[in-house]
Amino acid sequence: MGPRLVFDTYDDIRGRCDTAPVRQTGSVPGYDHGAIVPSDDWVPLTSDEAERHQADDSTPDSIRIELVRRSLPPLDPDDLSVRLEIAARLDPLNGRWPTNLLGCASSPGNWTTTTEDSTTGRRIGLHVDNFDRLPYPRRHQGRRRLCLNLGPGPRYLLIADHDIQQICRTFLADLDRHHPHTEDIRRYVAAGNPLRCLRIRLEPGDGYIAPTEFLAHDGSTAGIDQPSVAAFWLGRPPNAS
């Protein structure tokens, strides 16, 4: 199963979600060799596609993406440092479930993807997080990540339409001892397997709760001139499955 979005009607996400195929970068300056990024062929998500991606009561938490909104105080568009201070003292869900602040990332405008490998300075493209280091059989049990866009510019969440267990099943035999990794996504695409990407626009104050250990994802500021600061928390909702 691919990602499922929590929304009531198509109008709730109309004009906010697009879809495109992915491509492999090869040797592109500033990127890991073979990183997976979306193509530029974005098309709006249709009502039929939205219905296929809509979460319902039977949707497991491991593929559920919830879009959230948090009011932000007035902020100077040119002052990025104050956004870091706000994140440190913000309870992003008003006590709804406990979260630990992971940190913040400031992204310039017009980046196809935003996540960098801190050891190399290169962008890694679509990837899975690995904070919990869970093996394949338990991968769906990882904690959820909450991201909030603190602005000043909008940004996007990118989500692949196959989860990491689906991806690994296509080419691995010994799954029980395998620890899924970003390289699995690259190997899957390099072998010619189809993969598409959802793009969800996040205005300042918008955010998401997503299983980023299970779903290939990244951020993006493509086509947006302003920089933005994203704050990240890690936690587990009560009674998460």
Image: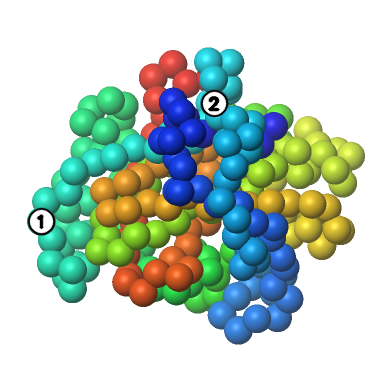
Above or below residue 50? Residue 39 is: below
* Label placed on residue 55: 2
Going by the numbered disc 2, the residue's amino acid type is Ala
- On the image, the x and y values in percent for residue 93 come to 26, 33
Horizontal placement of 55 versus 13: left or right? right
- On the image, the x and y values in percent for residue 183 come to 71, 58
Q: Secondary structure at mark 2?
A: loop
Above or below residue 215? Residue 143 is: above
**From where the camera sits, is residue 183 visible?**
no
Q: CA distance from mark 2 to mark 1?
A: 34 Å
The residue sitting at 30% across, 30% down in the picture is 98
Q: Quadrant of residue 209?
A: top left
Residue position marked by numbered label 1 in the rendering: 74
Q: Quadrant of residue 50?
A: top right
Q: Secondary structure at mark 1?
A: loop
Going by the numbered disc 1, the residue's amino acid type is Pro
The residue sitting at 44% across, 26% down in the picture is 8
Farthest left residue? 74
- On the image, the x and y values in percent for residue 24 come to 72, 68
- On the image, the x and y values in percent for residue 2 come to 66, 36
Q: Quadrant of residue 168?
A: top right
The residue sitting at 59% across, 30% down in the picture is 51
Q: Earlier in the sequence, mark 2 or mark 1?
A: 2
How crowded pointer 2 is (Cα within 10 Å; few <14, some 14-19, many 20+) is rated as: many
